[in-house]
Structure formats: structure tokens, C-alpha cells
Image (cartoon, helix red, strand yellow):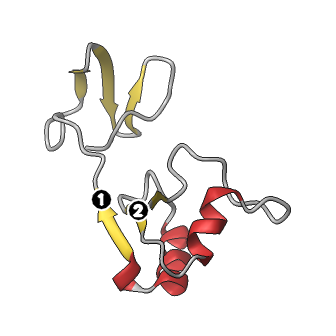
Amino acid sequence: MYSFINQMRPFHQCEMEVVGGALLKVKVKTEIVVDFVHSHPDAVKIAYRLKKASRIISITDAMRAKGLPYGNYDLGGQTIHVTENGEHLSAGALAGSV
């Protein structure tokens, strides 16, 4: 199984990368974090058209701050900042989903 786009080199017309290969392989099931933060709504549509629902596994990247108000939370010893723009590490990297 392959994760779809999250923390991978993206599909490019000159380089298929893992994403392109996973979408084309019939026997491979594709995991997608369908929160429209980790994956764009149109990327999800493309995956469903190519893979069909039976080959898609919808997964979560939720952290323990899910459902809690904006603020700072701990995730494995790292401070996560949850704001209206999502949840990020101090350096700006995406940190799970809420």
C-alpha cells in the first residue's frame, strides 16, 4: 500500500514518482488522508476515478488535539500550534490533523 502524496515527491509529467506508480498499479491499494489539508479535493477525485472506491483506504492523521480549541499542544515532545490555518510545528511543517 502507498500513501497518497503526503510527504512524498509529487507526481510530475516527467517523473511519475510513487504517487503516479501507485495510481496506475491495479493491485495496489492507495491510502489517502481525506481532510483536504493533506490532499487537495481534486487530487482525491483523481484517485477515486483511477482506483475506484474498492482500492482506496481513507485514513486519518488525527492527533490528540482533534476537536480541541486553538492553542498549543504536545505531540511526542514537540509543540504543535493549532490555529485557523491548521496544525503546525514551530518551523511551519504540517503536524497531523485536527
Which element carries disc 1, helix, strand or loop?
strand
Q: Find residue 24 and report its horizontal and vertical position in percent.
A: 62, 77
- Name the mark on residue 32: 2
Which element carries disc 2, helix, strand or loop?
strand
Q: Residue furthest top?
A: 77
Please state if 69 lies on the left or on the right of 32 as rendered: left
Q: Find residue 18 and report its horizontal and vertical position in percent.
A: 62, 57
- Going by the numbered disc 1, the residue's amino acid type is Ile
Q: Residues within 10 Å of mark 2 (few under 14, many from 20)?
A: many
Label 1 close to label 2 by CB (< 8 Å) = yes
The image quadrant of residue 57 is bottom left
Q: Which residue is mark 1?
A: 59
Q: Residue furthest front?
A: 27
The image quadrant of residue 14 is bottom right
Looking at the rendering, in which quadrant would you find the C terminus? top left
From mark 1 to mark 2, how far is it between C-alphas? 6 Å
What residue sits 50% from the left and 25% below the top?
92
